[in-house]
Amino acid sequence: MKEICVQTIYVSDLTHALDFYTQALGYEVKARYGSCIAQLHTQGATLVIQEIERGQACPDRPCTVLAFKTDNIAESMAQIVAAGGILLNDRPQPCPVGVFIAFKDPAGVLHELLQFTNE
């Protein structure tokens, strides 16, 4: 069973989103990764707010994506495809904490596989 390690909320305006999550829900910013990614301090899974251009990851609206932790991203990619999922990249993409691959489940729900490089 793959652990859900990161919950990412894709937004069109990071500053506006951080204002909401810090003021309305009481979260604190734990780390910033460049100008478009912020990690919030939570007691559970990591919560990341990431600014993206409209339509970049989710068509026509912001969305929430679960990232599933894997120790072998190539093997996990093969399992996704074998089970009817669709990979959105042909190879893992770099990110601040390791590599990831975006995929859709058979119902079209967007998720990611995440392999950390340093744990």
Image (cartoon, rainbow, N blue to C red):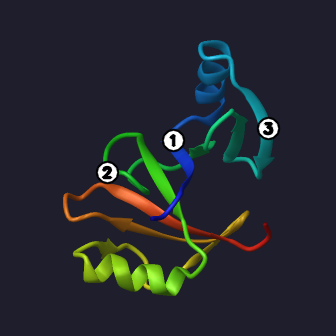
Up-down relation of residue 21 to residue 37 (above or below): above
Q: Quadrant of residue 109?
A: bottom left
Residue drawn at the location 78% of the way across and 66% of the way down: 119
Q: Secondary structure at mark 3?
A: strand
Give the camera-side residue of 52 and 101. 101
Residue 9 x, y percent position in the rendering:
51, 41
Q: Which residue is mark 1?
A: 9
Residue type pointed to by label 2: Pro
Q: Is residue 74 left or right of residue 109?
A: right
Residue drawn at the location 38% of the way across and 73% of the way down: 88
Label 3–label 1 contact, CB within 8 A: no
Task: Tell me which label, 3 or 2, sits earlier in the chain.
Answer: 3
Give the camera-side residue of 62 and 48. 48
Q: Which residue is mark 2?
A: 59
Residue 1 x, y percent position in the rendering:
45, 65
**Callout 3: 10 Å neighbours few (<14), some, many (20+)?**
few
Task: Tell me which label, 1 or 2, sits earlier in the chain.
Answer: 1
Query: Residue lying furthest front in this view?
Result: 1
- Residue 87 is labelled as none
Distance (Cα) linking label 3 and label 1: 15 Å
Distance (Cα) linking label 3 and label 2: 28 Å
Up-down relation of residue 118 to residue 48 (above or below): below
Q: Which residue is mark 3?
A: 30
Residue 44 x, y percent position in the rendering:
63, 38
Which of label 1 and label 2 is nearer to you? 1
Residue type pointed to by label 3: Lys
Residue type pointed to by label 1: Ile
Q: Quadrant of residue 32?
A: top right
Q: Is residue 92 left or right of residue 22?
A: left
**Callout 1: 10 Å neighbours few (<14), some, many (20+)?**
some
Q: Is residue 37 left or right of residue 88?
A: right
